């Protein structure tokens, strides 16, 4: 097994799928010669040429609209939003079109499309290079939404997304690109869409999270265990739509104390849905109110370091909240 | 005779007329069905049939891809949909090939006929048309893509993004603007100023042509030439077909709030269907008796298909839950 970075997992998933299937192609701003402004398509242009690794005009609705057309024709486009913050002009193509093609045509047409969305704050990204826009899409039937936290999941979920016959939004946390390394099998594998993953077994409290905050929660759990003997069970959602209800309920029931953590705003975020699922099914197994830890409901995020630090979650903020829950 | 010079056989030009007339009669029937409460809603194509059918005859029905907009009844009939298909759609029945009774009428789709499923937000189909053409280029397939829209849609970002993309990649797309003068109640003068839609093509580096949408043979000529250019690898063409939407926007619209009876009357005189009929008569290909027989034949067909669609079953209520995603058994 090779140890690779999160970003390498993304590039290698695309490279392998493009080698495996001629119908797969990549399009977006600067994804070709430049290899992506975040280097997420590096080397693909050199191997597959400009037709399959296409630098598009700067126009997000056009990028997704073209991809929707190509997908309906029978290709498997991977459309890159340069930053997830710029997806909003394309929301009509995603929500009104891609998500509804199968339903509106009574299964006559399908739209096997992947939209890659580099999201989250990395430091200094300010209001328009830091957002977590996943909640905008989570309530849309017809979309699948994934948000891997590790290189293993990143590669396996991207491959699954490319092979899926429905549109998949693939949220890749920019801060994971270089900070996360991990073992990835040498051979072909997929991580199934719709399956959450227990990243740490525990008995006192359950933390349900996804993306970068999975790692903060894991660090916090290690420290709490070592320092205070608190045992945290950590569930990585991995797929935000459809949510893995079985895994959520099982992890919640394990401890009866649940903390939901994400970098997206609290109001309207995925956490609210997770909390509702638990409240609907498990009320009498709870030993504490369901807690949520998210940044405040303000736009993500101030450019200056003090505001940014105030806004963003980190290991210590999560650790404090986990302790509070354990002591409840 | 002009149609022969353009490469149309006598049979084809008569068929073209037949399609326009079938669309007109279908439309008239739908209005009656809506007014009598048998169907919920109808959006009309009256006044636009000539340009639609004429454009359709310029395509290769076995290869080309079509992204029509919601008034394109004459177009979809000309590329292979049937009056029964359309009736099943207005009655929202399970057998409706476009959507299984899920979408409003006018939201066409038929994969076998390469009629690409469409939605209601306007102009979304324009970049999609470019995407289909790009996919064809990537796969080395030889076909052309037709996408139509009203002049109102040409103000949407997706129009510009789709045209620009097709221009950059010299894609075989024909952008067919059915300029019917109104976006619901908003007249052309409040949408586009002094410019012509056709001129917008200059900004994308391909030809833009304005044509009289009531002149069937002229529309056929410009679309055919545009298709030939496209197939030679010379890229897209924007065609602005000038026409007039004779009825209100839909059965839910009162057009007398924003235009006059006189204006509508005046435009009815320019009807392209009557014009093509006269042409056929002048060519000696048609006469009043044949015309009456054709009207009877179409009326009979519409009666039959209305009855068929009215009796056809609705989808089962629980079919509501189907086809949000691919079901495992289909994968």
Image (cartoon, coloured by chain):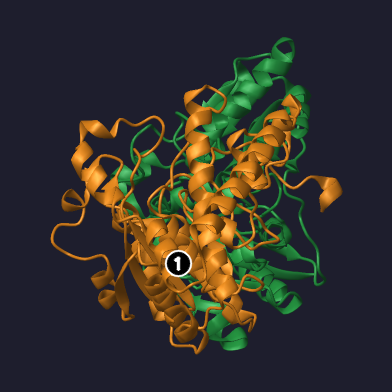
Question: In this structure image, what is the colour of chain B?
Answer: orange
Q: Quadrant of the N terminus of chain B?
A: bottom left
- Residue at 63% from the left image edge and 49% from the top image edge: B297
- Residue at 49% from the left image edge and 57% from the top image edge: B288
The image position of residue B213, as x and y in percent, is: 35, 63
- Residue at 13% from the left image edge and 61% from the top image edge: B194
The image position of residue A29, as x and y in percent, is: 43, 71
Q: Residue furthest left?
A: B194
Name the side, left or right, on which B20 lies relative to A184: left
- Using the image as rendered, state which of residue A208 and residue B109 is in the foreground: B109
- Using the image as rendered, state which of residue B139 and residue B299 is in the foreground: B299
Rate crowding at label 1 as few (under 14), some (14 to 19) or many (20 or more) other CA atoms within 10 Å: some
The image position of residue B170, as x and y in percent, is: 44, 82
Name the side, left or right, on which B325 lies relative to B180: right
- Using the image as rendered, state which of residue B88 and residue B103 is in the foreground: B88
Q: What chain does mark 1 sit on?
A: B
- Residue B296 visible in the shown view: yes
Question: In this structure image, what is the colour of chain A?
Answer: green
The image position of residue A262, as x and y in percent, is: 53, 38
Tally of marks: 1
Identify the residue under disc 1: B281
Name the side, left or right, on which A239 lies relative to B78: right
From what the image shows, is residue B125 above or below residue A198?
below
- Residue A239 visible in the shown view: no
- Residue at 45% from the left image edge and 67% from the top image edge: B281
> Hey, which quadrant is residue B91 in on the image?
top right
- Using the image as rendered, state which of residue A258 and residue B241 is in the foreground: B241
> Hey, which quadrant is residue B311 in on the image?
top right
Q: Residue furthest right?
A: B329
| Secondary element at tag 1 | helix
């Amino acid at each position: 097994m090779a140890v690779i970075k999160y970003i390498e997992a993304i590039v290698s998933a695309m490279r392998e799928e493009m080698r495996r299937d001629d119908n797969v192609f990549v399009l977006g701003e600067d994804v070709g010669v430049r290899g992506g402004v975040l280097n997420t398509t590096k080397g693909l242009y050199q191997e597959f040429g400009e037709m399959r690794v296409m630098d598009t005009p700067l126009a997000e609705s056009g990028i997704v609209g073209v991809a929707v057309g190509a997908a309906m024709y029978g290709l498997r486009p991977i459309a890159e939003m340069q930053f997830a913050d710029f997806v909003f002009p394309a929301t009509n193509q995603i929500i009104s079109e891609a998500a509804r093609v199968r339903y509106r045509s009574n299964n006559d047409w399908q739209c096997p499309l992947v939209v890659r969305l580099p999201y989250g704050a990395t430091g200094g990204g300010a209001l328009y290079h830091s957002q977590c826009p996943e909640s905008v899409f989570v309530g849309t039937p017809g979309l699948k939404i994934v948000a891997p936290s590790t290189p293993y999941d990143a590669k396996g979920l991207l491959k699954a997304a490319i092979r899926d016959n429905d549109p998949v939004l693939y949220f890749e946390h920019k801060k994971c690109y270089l900070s996360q390394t991990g073992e990835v099998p040498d051979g072909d594998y997929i991580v199934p869409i719709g399956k959450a993953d227990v990243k740490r077994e525990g008995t006192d409290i359950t933390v349900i999270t996804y993306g970068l905050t999975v790692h903060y929660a894991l660090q916090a759990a290690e420290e709490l265990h070592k320092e205070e003997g608190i045992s945290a069970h950590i569930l990585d959602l991995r797929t935000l739509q459809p949510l893995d209800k079985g895994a959520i309920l099982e992890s919640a029931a394990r401890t009866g104390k649940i903390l939901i953590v994400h970098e997206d705003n609290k109001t309207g975020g995925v956490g609210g849905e997770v909390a509702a699922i638990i409240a609907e099914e498990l009320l009498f197994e709870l030993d504490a109110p369901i807690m949520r830890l998210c940044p405040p409901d303000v736009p993500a995020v101030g450019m200056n370091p003090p505001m940014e630090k105030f806004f963003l979650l980190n290991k210590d903020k999560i650790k404090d909240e986990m302790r509070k829950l354990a002591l409840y | 005779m002009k149609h022969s010079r353009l490469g149309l056989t006598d049979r084809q030009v008569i068929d073209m007329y037949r399609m326009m007339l079938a669309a007109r009669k279908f439309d008239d029937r739908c209005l009656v069905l809506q007014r009598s409460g048998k169907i919920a809603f109808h959006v009309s194509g009256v006044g636009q049939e000539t340009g639609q059918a004429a454009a359709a005859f310029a395509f290769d029905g076995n290869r080309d891809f079509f992204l029509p907009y919601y008034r394109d009844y004459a177009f979809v009939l000309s590329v292979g949909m049937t009056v029964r298909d359309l009736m099943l759609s207005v009655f929202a029945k399970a057998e409706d090939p476009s959507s299984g009774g899920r979408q409003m009428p006018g939201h066409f789709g038929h994969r076998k006929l390469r009629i690409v499923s469409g939605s209601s937000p306007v102009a979304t189909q324009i970049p999609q048309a470019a995407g289909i053409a790009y996919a064809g280029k990537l796969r080395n397939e030889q076909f052309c893509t037709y996408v139509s829209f009203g002049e109102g849609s040409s103000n949407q970002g997706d129009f510009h993004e789709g045209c620009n993309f097709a221009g950059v990649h010299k894609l075989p797309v024909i952008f067919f603007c059915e300029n019917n003068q109104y976006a619901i109640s908003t007249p052309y003068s409040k949408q586009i100023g002094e410019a012509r839609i056709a001129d917008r093509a200059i900004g994308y580096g391909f030809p833009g042509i304005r044509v009289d949408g009531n002149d069937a043979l002229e529309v056929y000529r410009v679309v055919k030439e545009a298709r030939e250019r496209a197939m030679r690898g010379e890229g897209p063409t924007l065609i602005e077909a000038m026409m007039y939407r004779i009825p209100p926007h839909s059965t839910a619209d009162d057009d007398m709030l924003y235009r006059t009876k006189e204006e509508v009357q005046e435009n009815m005189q320019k009807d392209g269907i009557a014009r093509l009929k006269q042409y056929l008569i002048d060519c000696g290909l048609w006469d009043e008796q044949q015309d009456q027989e054709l009207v009877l034949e179409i009326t009979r067909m519409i009666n039959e298909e209305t009855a068929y669609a009215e009796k056809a079953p609705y989808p089962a209520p629980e079919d509501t839950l189907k086809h949000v995603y691919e079901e495992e058994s289909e994968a």
